[in-house]
Amino acid sequence: MTEQVESADGAQNRTSVERRGDRELLVTRIFDAPPSTVFRAWSQAELFQRWWVPKSVPGISLVSCEMDVRTGGKYRLEFGAGGSDTMAFYGKYLEVVPNERIVWTNDEGEEGAITTVTFEDQGGKTLLTFHELYPSREALEEALQGSAVALPEQLEQLDELLSSLPE
């Protein structure tokens, strides 16, 4: 059963966020950029850190962004709110197919999801599919109350960044 959780931004490229069953989250959006450009924004730390943190969350910044985007590589994202306290998210890349797919783990806790992002060519545009599989219903519920709420805004920020990048 598919349950529509949220549709966002009245822009021409709407973000769809859906809950699928007890443990899955599916987010889709079409970007006016080819898959190679969208993939770069997900795989190059200097681009990723320009769009990943929602601007509506005041005072939070990505203070460290380490990404070795290759099969077997690792990532570590460290967020801060101006003081010495930070929160880290980290994991490893299970599969990376340039311009097509990135699969990674979220290893910061026992309830971490496996995330798959695919980049599908749609005649020079990209259909991005962001899929997360959680280990339990409770983990998905927690995500739907937390990080998943920001995804439409994050993807809107990605759209803004893509419009400024060369193809």
Image (cartoon, rainbow, N blue to C red):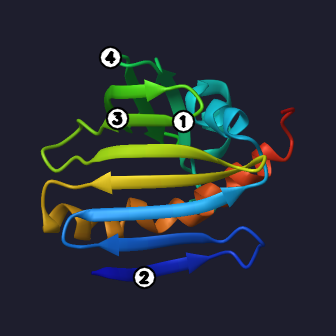
The secondary structure type at the circle numbered 1 is: loop
Kindly report the distance in space between the C-alpha atoms of the residues bearing marks 1 and 4. Answer: 17 Å
Query: Mark 3: which amino acid?
Result: Trp
Q: Is residue 166 left or right of residue 13?
A: right
Kindly report the distance in space between the C-alpha atoms of the residues bearing marks 2 and 1. Answer: 26 Å
The residue at which mark 1 appears reads as 100
Location of residue 161 by image quarter: top right
Residue 166 x, y percent position in the rendering: 87, 32
The residue at which mark 4 appears reads as 72
Local packing at callout 3 (Cα closer than 10 Å; few below 14, some 14-19, many 20+) is many
Circle nearer the N terminus (1, 4): 4
Residue 143 x, y percent position in the rendering: 31, 63
Kindly report the distance in space between the C-alpha atoms of the residues bearing marks 4 and 2. Answer: 34 Å
Residue that appears at 27% across and 81% down: 1
Kindly report the distance in space between the C-alpha atoms of the residues bearing marks 3 and 1. Answer: 14 Å
The residue at which mark 3 appears reads as 104
Query: Mark 4: which amino acid?
Result: Gly
